């Protein structure tokens, strides 16, 4: 029997609202934040809520719905860590909530960008500068946007507006070794099989065309619509573009090596089991085993009736099949729909309640020490 998450987790964090589920989690030395973006407030669906340090609850509202859809941590120079929580409203404005881990004080920025779903995806661009990327994949005409936001001032800059659901996923990382993060935006419906657009971080501004477009294919469809992360999977010291994709032979994670000119033509892949939604979410805790290349955590929430997740160690070359997965408990729920990096020492994986238990069960976040690997 594959290892069950309950047997390996260092600790767990129970959801606090029956039926609301849990989706995102942040755990640092100063603050913990748990989100439930599907929570209903005052009879209004999907207003969302976050729980800070297990005691303070912040709830969404009609102009700030699905609060906690995404969470991230930045630490602007000279300041304490700040947690960023997106609230991608279906209306033409969105709210970005900021939590100072030292106080903790909470404030928000209203982003009046004339586009819905801003913050459906979120990634840290420059943690020391306090800038993040927000994706807005559901603007008019099937187009989407990628927006850069300064979390301290609320200043927002539209980087790109494009077709194909641009902004369904966003990521940032140094692909060319110059010490500056590139910007990645997923457009899973572009030209059929999807694409990932890449902007060189050293020369980027509003309205600029991408420097590289990584196009999907029959062997990597829905590219940009599933997991997207930058991690050094080949051990050469620069980041690699890692993306979930679909094929006729099962889901895969495609790894495009970053090079000096962002030449992403060649790729390796991690072949997942068929029908498992393998690669729907990706995260990387960095190089845990000390061999010079990073590790990946890969979701597979449709793996068996329990759900699952895989841990894959670099370096990755050619075609790699993941090893034994973690699976959820036999409660009829969904394990692995969301996951991430809680801190330098821990990763987390969410487990949602099954339909029969949703009225009583609020879900649970399982936290695992990276020492396990």
Image (cartoon, rainbow, N blue to C red):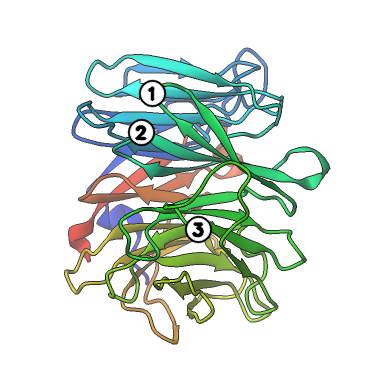
Left or right, 98 with reference to 370: right
Find the distance from the CA under tag 2 to the CA under tag 3: 21 Å
Label 2 vs 3, first from the N-terminus: 2
Separation of marks 3 and 1 at Cα, in angstroms: 26 Å
**Going by the image, does 208 lie left or right of 348?**
right
Q: Position of residue 54 (x, y in %)?
A: 31, 23
- Residue that appears at 55% across and 25% down: 48
Q: Position of residue 341 (x, y in %)?
A: 33, 49
Distance from the alpha carbon under mark 1 to that under mark 2: 7 Å
x and y, in percent, of residue 105 in the image = 32, 14
Counting residues from the start of the chain, the first of labels 1 and 2 encountered is 2
- Pick the residue in front: 112 or 97: 112
Query: Residue 130's mark?
Result: 2
Whether 215 is drawn above or below 66: the answer is below
Residue 324 sits in which quadrant?
A: bottom left
Neighbourhood count class around disc 1 (C-alpha, 10 Å): few under 14, some 14–19, many 20 upward: some
Dot 3 or dot 1, earlier in sequence: 1
Q: Secondary structure at mark 2?
A: loop
Q: Which mark is residue 152?
A: 1
């Amino acid at each position: 029997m594959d290892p069950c998450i309950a047997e390996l987790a260092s600790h767990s964090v129970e959801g606090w609202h029956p039926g609301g589920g849990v989706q995102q989690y942040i755990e640092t030395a100063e603050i913990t934040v748990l989100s439930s973006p599907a929570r209903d407030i005052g009879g209004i669906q999907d207003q969302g809520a976050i729980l800070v340090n297990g005691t303070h609850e912040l709830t969404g509202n009609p102009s700030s719905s699905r609060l906690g859809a995404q969470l991230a941590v930045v630490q602007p120079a000279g300041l304490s860590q700040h947690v960023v929580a997106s609230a991608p409203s279906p209306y033409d404005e969105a709210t970005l909530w900021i939590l100072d881990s030292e106080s903790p004080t909470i404030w928000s920025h209203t982003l009046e960008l004339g586009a819905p779903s801003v913050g459906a995806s979120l990634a840290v661009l420059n943690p020391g500068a306090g800038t993040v990327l927000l994706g807005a994949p559901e603007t008019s005409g099937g187009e989407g946007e990628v927006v850069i936001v300064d979390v301290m001032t609320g200043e927002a800059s539209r980087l790109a507006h494009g077709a194909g659901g641009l902004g369904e996923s966003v990521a940032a990382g140094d692909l060319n070794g110059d010490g500056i993060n590139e910007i990645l935006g997923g457009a899973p419906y572009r030209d059929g099989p999807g694409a990932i657009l890449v902007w060189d971080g050293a020369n980027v501004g509003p309205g600029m065309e991408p420097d590289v477009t990584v196009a999907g294919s029959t062997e990597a469809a829905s590219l940009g619509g599933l997991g997207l992360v930058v991690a050094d999977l080949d051990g050469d010291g620069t980041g690699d573009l890692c993306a979930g994709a679909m094929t006729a032979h099962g889901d895969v994670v495609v790894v495009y090596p970053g090079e000096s000119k962002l030449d992403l033509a060649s790729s390796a892949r991690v072949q997942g089991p068929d029908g498992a939604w393998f690669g729907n979410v990706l995260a990387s805790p960095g190089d845990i085993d000390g061999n010079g290349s990073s590790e990946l955590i890969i979701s597979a929430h449709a793996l068996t009736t329990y759900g699952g997740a895989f841990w894959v160690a670099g370096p990755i070359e050619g075609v790699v099949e993941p090893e034994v997965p973690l699976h959820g408990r036999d409660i009829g729920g969904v394990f692995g729909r969301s996951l991430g990096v809680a801190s330098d020492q821990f990763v987390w994986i969410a487990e949602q309640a099954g339909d029969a238990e949703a009225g009583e069960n609020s879900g649970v976040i399982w936290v695992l020490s990276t020492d396990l690997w």
